[in-house]
Amino acid sequence: MKLLDLFRTYKKKIVFIFSLTIVENGAWIIEPWIFGTLIDEFILKANGSVFQLAPIKFLPLFLWILLYGINSGTGTIRRMYEPKIFQNIFADIVTKISKRGQRDNVNTSVVAGRAQLSHEYINFLQYRIPELLEQSIAIVGAICALTIFDWRISAACMLVVLPLGVIGQFYNKRVLYLQKDLHDQYETIVDTFVTKKPENIRSIYKSMANVQSKIGKYNGFNFGFMRLTLLIVFLAVLYISIDLDNFTTGDIYAIVSYLWTFITSAEYLPELMESRASLKDISQRISIEEDVETIKIPV
């Protein structure tokens, strides 16, 4: 079973959710620039500068309220429909796995383990892909916005991409190997409980904990390296912003906001790669040649 097959089967419902995610985060990535302009307008007024009652002077405020409304509205709608859509898809997948297991006379423990592991597909569709869209919009949007302020700032951010990509490839290969080991043990849980021996149950969960601990060590190393790299970028951006350019207070606010957006989004990449590695192994375990029947989910 492949993620693409699920997407094709439930295309309309999934595209509906993903579209809301794009609109929600697209509006939010513009917000720092608009709010920075709004700060400058109010600083001019506070300093006694001419503050005409012309519509153009209030445009930043109206735009910020509009963006806030779009972000909040689409976010509300998405959260209302997500659980119903994706949990019905999960119910359909589990049913197909059960039928396939009975037909091929697969061990009950393996079928139960695969049924539970298949929830990774739902997690990936419901959480990971929207998060990937969110982080992609954040990273690309932040770099584009920083380029408008000063190309040297965005160049400093882009320098992070190469080392993170190299480390990410190594991380992904190791985690894929460990995820395979973890899933092998997951498929034996039911049989282990059937033995009714506490020592066997303790042993398998302790073994799974050891594998997860190894994954955590790789994750920790990747995170630490990324934080160190991002610290260098942050200091470089601050130097460019404060010492080399004559930015307004609103500009500084926007630059720092976009920089933090870039940093927090980049920090999330290892978790996405770990989830993708897990899903890749699960795809090799679960095989459903028959097309998954679409559930009628009213929207």
Image (tube, grey):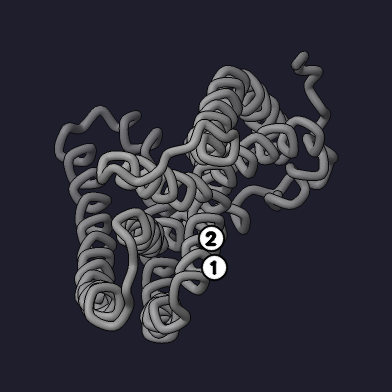
Res. 10 image quadrant: top right
**Where's residue 275, x and y in %?**
46, 54
Label 2: how many Cα within 10 Å (few below 14, some 14–19, many 20+): many
Task: Tell me whether the residue at label 2 lies in contact with that at label 1, contact meaning CB atoms closer than 8 angstroms.
Answer: yes
Q: Secondary structure at mark 2?
A: helix
Q: Position of residue 268 (x, y in %)?
A: 37, 57
Residue found at x 48% / y 47%: 34
Label number found at residue 269: none
Q: How many marks?
A: 2
State the residue in front, 237 or 188. 237
Q: Is residue 180 left or right of residue 236?
A: right
- Residue 144's disc is 1
Give residue 43's position: percent from left, percent from top.
Answer: 30, 45
**Residue type (three-letter) at the residue carrying disc 2:** Gly
Q: Residue at x 70, y 49 (%)?
A: 1
Q: Is residue 31 above or below residue 226?
A: above
Q: Secondary structure at mark 1?
A: helix
User: Considering depth in this image, is 44 or 228 the residue closer to the camera?
Assistant: 44
Q: Nearer the viewer, residue 99 or 134?
A: 134
Q: Residue at x 25, y 28 (%)?
A: 196
Residue 48 seen in this snapshot: yes
Label drawn at residue 141: 2
